[in-house]
Image (spheres, helix red, strand yellow):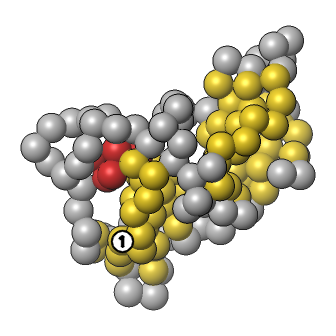
Amino acid sequence: DTPQIIDVTSGLGASTDFIPYIYVDADGEHLYITNAANSDPNDYLINKLRYNPSNLEINTVSSFSLDASFVKTSNACVKNNKLYTLVGGVLTSYNLPAGTKTVLGTYNSIVGRIFNFNGSVYFTSGEVGKKWNL
């Protein structure tokens, strides 16, 4: 496919770089950006955006807060209105947009990564990923 220019109708804050993380929902339509889309130093402030492939636009849908203990990480994924993180062996889910935190388990002996692929969540600790039913 040929790359397309996408119009972002609601931009990122630009005065200071708060190093926001962007999480893409397994549905392929929604993006979640930490630090209120780079407008605030608090990692737990989230902006939800929607990608519209028919007109090549990304628009803000809503803004909300996660539990203040949220730690942004690249070891995360989003599916079914939940943001899952795996930090220091602790698997946590955050209900979006309610923001509530649930610790799903502690796996100190397992080091690995969680990620979205083809609408599903996978875990890998090496070269092979295993599908998780989250």
Label 1 element class = strand
- Pointer 1 local density, CA inside 10 Å: few below 14, some 14–19, many at least 20: some
- The picture quadrant where one finds residue 57 is bottom left
Q: Nearer the viewer, residue 124 or 17?
A: 17
x, y percent for residue 85: 65, 37
Q: Quadrant of residue 88?
A: top right
Q: Is residue 123 left or right of residue 20?
A: right
Residue at x 83%, y 51% (from the top left corner): 134
Residue 37 vs 101, above or below: the answer is below
Along the line of sight, which residue is nearer the eye, 21 or 124? Answer: 21
Report which quarter residue 81 is drawn in. Answer: bottom right
User: Residue visible at 15% across and 38% down?
Assistant: 16
Q: What residue is rendered at 77% in x and 49% in y? A: 121
The answer to whether any part of residue 114 appears in the image is: no
Q: x and y percent of residue 45 in the render? A: 39, 48
Where residue 116 appears, x then y in whole percent?
Answer: 69, 50
Q: Is residue 116 above or below residue 119?
A: above
In the rendered view, tell whether residue 49 sits above or below residue 131: below
Which amino acid type is shown beneath numbered disc 1?
A: Thr
Q: How many marks?
A: 1
Task: List the residue tagged with mark 1.
Answer: 60
- Residue furthest top in the image: 109
- Camera-side residue: 119 or 96? 96
Left or right of 13 in this view: 48: right
**Which residue is most to the left?**
15
Q: Is residue 26 left or right of residue 23?
A: right
